[in-house]
Image: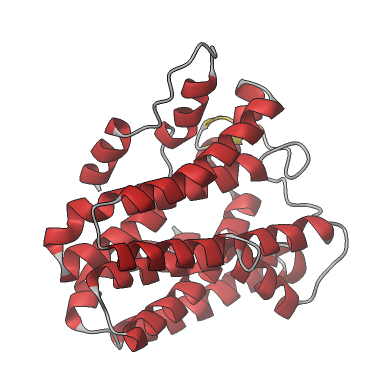
Amino acid sequence: MQRFETYLKENLPQVPSFHPIYEDALGVMLEAGGKRFRPMLLLNIVDAYEPMLYNSALPVALALEMFHTYSLIHDDLPVMDNADLRRGHMTLHKRYDEVTAILTGDALNSDAFYLIAKAPLREDVKIKLVELLARDGGSRGMVLGQAIDCYFENKPLDLEQIKILHTNKTAKLIAVSLQMGGVIVGLEKKEQEALYAFGIDLGLLFQIQDDIIDETQSEEEAGKTTSNDGDKNSFVNLLGLEKSIEEADALAKDLQRQFENFDEKLQDALGVTVRKYLFRHKQ
């Protein structure tokens, strides 16, 4: 992923003006690091099937990271999670102020689609990529999940409802990262659908693992505010820690079975990533 990190640092938003902090604010959370999970999934698929398209896919990968970062900036706001720490750094509303954090999130959201639109890919491919990110990042996906999460604070949901919440809030953006990689390289619709289904389960596992981390790690270990989900509908709050680990184990084993049904190229492409995250909750 060093190629992506280099590309990101060379392509941070540049908006010179007389505003003293605006341009810095746009880049600070992107530079702060993170797992780069979503761009990694997309680029691994491109590299496996059409490595000549790798450089052309970099703007799309950065768009995914920008979009994800916007969602974190807004999620950390006082009106939502009221978090002080993200990626080992002060959250934007703490570093600057709430207005700056809101506007930075808004800007990164829009800039994500601008990057896709300007990517050196075929027009029909770019239209499809915009459609998919808008579908799963907007009212039918991530925003719906966030709305459910916020509205039902202190109102316990059942397990199926919690899965719907986190399928939308977390899993769909992970799933669509895989599907967008498939679109760039021209995979058949059936293969794209299999990737998307795998991504949904991977995203749910990712969320259960995050809930376990929130319960078991300090802020320094996690690099973000932890023990902050007491009023939230998390898997740990519903099932308890031990049952959540059992749920994560079962989902990880199912994902391993799905993964083994992929063709050799796809297994090579995603093998390192999948193995790294399947049992992250036990590391």
Q: Is residue 91 left or right of residue 117?
A: right
Q: Which of 40 and 258 lies nearest the eye of the viewer? A: 40
Residue 244, given in percent of the width and then of the height, sits at 63, 70
Q: Residue at x 22, y 43 (%)?
A: 2
Q: Classify 32 as above or below 75.
A: above
Name the quadrant of the C terminus.
Answer: bottom left
Q: Which of 160 and 195 lies nearest the eye of the viewer? A: 195
User: By what rule are the colours in the image chosen?
Assistant: secondary structure
Residue 210, given in percent of the width and then of the height, sits at 57, 57
Q: Is residue 65 something one can see in this rendering? A: no
Q: Is residue 102 something one can see in this rendering? A: yes
Q: Which residue is drawn at 35% across and 88% down?
A: 190
Name of the residue lying farthest toward the left:
52
Q: Which of 63 and 113 lies nearest the eye of the viewer? A: 113
Q: In which quarter of the image is residue 156?
A: bottom right
Q: Classify 192 as above or below 10.
A: below
Q: Residue at x 52, y 25 (%)?
A: 25
Q: Residue at x 47, y 71 (%)?
A: 202
Q: Quadrant of residue 84?
A: top right
Residue 229, given in percent of the width and then of the height, sits at 73, 51
Name of the residue lying farthest toward the right:
155
Q: Is residue 37 left or right of residue 156?
A: left
Q: Is residue 40 left or right of residue 77?
A: left
Residue 8, given in percent of the width and then of the height, sits at 32, 38
Q: In this view, does 270 lie to the left or right of 204?
A: left
